[in-house]
Image (cartoon, rainbow, N blue to C red):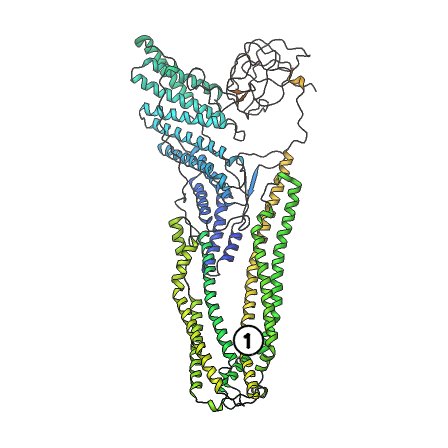
Amino acid sequence: MATTFVSVPLKKASEVDLSKPLSKFIAATYPSGESQAEYVRAAEEVNKLRKSAVGRPLDKHDSSLDTLLRYYDQLCAIEPKFPFAENQLCLTFTWKDAFDKGSLFGGSVKLALASLGYEKTCVLFNVGALASQIAAEQNLENDEGLKSAAKYYQLATGVFQHIKDSVLSALNREPTMDISPDTVGTLSLIMLAQAQEVFFLKAAADKMKDAIIARLANQAADYYGDAFKQCQYKEHLPKEVLPVLAAKHCMMQANAEYHQSILAKQQKKFGEEIARLQHGTDLVKTIASRYDEYINVKDLSDKISRALTAAKKDNDFIYHDRVPDVKDLEPIGKASLVKSTPVTVPMSPKFSDLFAKMVPLAVQQALSVYNQRRADLVNRMIAQMRESTNLANGILASLNLPAAIEDISGDSIPQSILEKSSSVIQQGGLQTIDQLIKDLPDLLQRNSEILDESMKILEQEEITDNDLKTKFKERWQRTPSNELYKPLRADGANFRATLNRAVQADKVVRERYAAHSEIIALLCKPEAELNTAIPSGNPTRSLQGSEVVTLLKTLLASLNEVKKERETLENDIKSVEFDMSSKFLTALAQDGAINEEAVSVTELDRIYGGHTDRVQKNLKKQEELLANIQRAHEEFSKSTQSNTDANQREEILKKLAAAHDQFVELVANLREGTKFYNGLTEILLKFQTKCSDIVFARKTERDELLKDMQQSMAREPSAPNLATPAYQTAVSINESTPGPTPAPRTVFQPKPQPPARPPPPSIGSTYAPASFGTAAGASAPASAPASAPVSASPGLIGGTGMPSQAQGPPYPSYQGYPGYYQMPMPMGYGQYGYGQYNMPYMYQPPGQPPFQSAQQPQQPGYPYPQQQYYQQ
């Protein structure tokens, strides 16, 4: 038995370079090294995989399907690891509608979206389409071919069902017709019906019990009937789908009746056997008369005919069993063996994640927040220690320590002052500060220019987008730039505020430098000039070796130890390294989400808890030492000889000690400022690249959208729609007269023998040509013979020929039979769209002239009026 199966065409994709944007993100996110190089190579492999999967024609073979599956698996694997979004990692994917063949004035319908979910949906559609094509190529004469066909049809069923459930959430706008939930739901049902038919064929080949085979066939018929109902009003589907589904429904029902008749014969129900065989005969006759272009049922027809002839003969001569009406027969049971294959990642057994070592984006984001928390904690501890050091230095400078207890002669420079002077001279003195201050404006200007340029390109693109939106209004359907760029503008505002704060910090540093530059310059003088600048005096000669001086020296030595311990502690805190990736990955695997704050706070307390305790002990020890030093210095001050020269000398020594501390702090601040500006430059360059990439992607999307709009406008009719004149609608349908309901025909009309022609109507008030249109809304000529009245069927809306609900496939007779469906013409059918497959049957009896006049009456059996033709 030759049969036909419906297969789905593949979608076609435009070329997209995945490697460049992925590599840019990798270079901006991960430090240079072996890992970065490995990720860049993986990005290039993904790009090659896409070209193999969607960039070339695919053979109807397992290897091609596996390529598609591996690419889909890879998309699922990288989706949580890269920030695919219009305002982040912007990649625009363009796909054509699988069922749209284009037109004379433009290309086919296509959609471009910056959405990885859209790419995944389209690739998955091709998985289902290719699976249906591979299944249709299988040899159903052997067991292996039957198993393969069933496997691929069930895969296609699951794939299309998955798209139906997920497509709207994966896209942020209306999809093309081929991947709309309604269409893929219909395709899923068609694939399910075909899988059930394959199971029926296998059961028949394996010679299973007729009761089982009948149930399998009946279930297949039921699936085909449901698919037909859903398919009626989908004009975008290929025109041959509808008749194939209708024929398959009848064919599987005929098979069910045939095998159920064998069961009836075994149960000695000979009348039921004949009734079922008669029904099966009518079904195959319907297929042969209407759908013989698609389905060949000659073998099935012969088999049923032979069985019916034998059954009638035996019943007439032997059993004399009453033949019941078909509608009185017990319904045949149903048995479904098909099950849609669920979409579970990975779908390919050969899949290997190219980015297996890269953590998911959720973990990356958690790591970013954790690193900020860690940096805040470390900076807070280091700031506390540095503030304490500055406090100690300030207090010692105000007490002129240790210079006061080192000044024995009152004429020479104290050793501590000489050491401070030497340190400042070795670091370059004022020249170092001047150079650092001189570099700051250039660094600031560079960062400002980068930020200004980044915001400028966003503003220019937004202006262009607003102009196009104003021009095309509702036709311009894409995310507005002002909404898309909100996160980028927020980042830009943060960078601007950071630069403004840096400018204020620079101003404070310059003011401090101006206040202390003179004394710092004095500290940089040679020893002889420095000694001359310090007044002479001898305030402590008599106290050298005293108990209070010894105590001060001991306390100062202890304070220096505390400072050194603090430097070591700072280095230890900075050197702590701990990889939180495993912690966040574990949390993500266990809970499906990451509570970053809870995990980070716990780990930071565990990692830095000991360091925090050491810092606090160090600060408390310094506090105690400073209190003791101040008390000892008070006692020391009471014992010193006070005179004007001594006071002036002490004041200068204090300023020199403070100048050293100011120099060290100014140099540190300026170097931190230089480092900050250089680091900010790198960040702003990445920000500028991000803005440029997004604007470039928006430009590409804009060009595609403009091209599509131009093609769409080219396809639109240039002339306005004209209202139908009243004289063309003069003849109405006689709604009170019941009439036959047409069966769905996309190829051939039934071939009735028409009665003799009535005379043509005269040109005048009865001249009422029907208007062009589809089956819905057609009207019959007033002169139509009474034997073939045309009216709205009960299942149509308002008597216009439009079905009120989905109709089932036709049965040849038995309107009282429970499974009987009245069939309207499908909405997509146009009786005047004559082509290879939809030329209506025009019967011309011998001896009659050809149809030339517009006044020809309507042929019986063809319930839609012919169009009047105007003479040229």
Badge 1 marks a residue whose secondary structure is helix
Q: Could you tell me the amino acid type at mark 1?
A: Gln
Question: Relative to 547, does residue 242 appear above or below in the rendering?
Answer: above
Question: Of all residues shown, which one is farthest toward the front?
Answer: 638
Location of residue 558 by image quarter:
bottom left
Location of residue 480 by image quarter:
top right
Q: Closest to the observer: 93 or 489?
A: 489
Q: Residues within 10 Å of mark 1 (few under 14, many from 20)?
A: many
Q: Position of residue 554 (x, y in %)?
A: 42, 82
Question: Relative to 790, does residue 555 appear above or below in the rendering?
Answer: below
Q: Closest to the observer: 176 or 848?
A: 176
Q: Closest to the observer: 395 or 802?
A: 395
Q: Position of residue 627 (x, y in %)?
A: 45, 76
Instruction: Say whether residue 736 is left or right of residue 155.
Output: right
Residue located 35% across and 32% down the image: 143
Report how many numbered discs are placed on residues in the image.
1
Instruction: Say whether residue 353 is left or right of residue 760.
Output: left
Mark 1 highlights which residue? 662
Question: Relative to 762, does residue 50 appear above or below in the rendering?
Answer: below
Q: Position of residue 119 (x, y in %)?
A: 50, 43
Instruction: Say whether residue 447 is left or right of residue 136.
Output: right
Instruction: Say whether residue 122 is left or right of residue 510.
Output: left
Question: Relative to 652, does residue 478 appear above or below in the rendering?
Answer: above
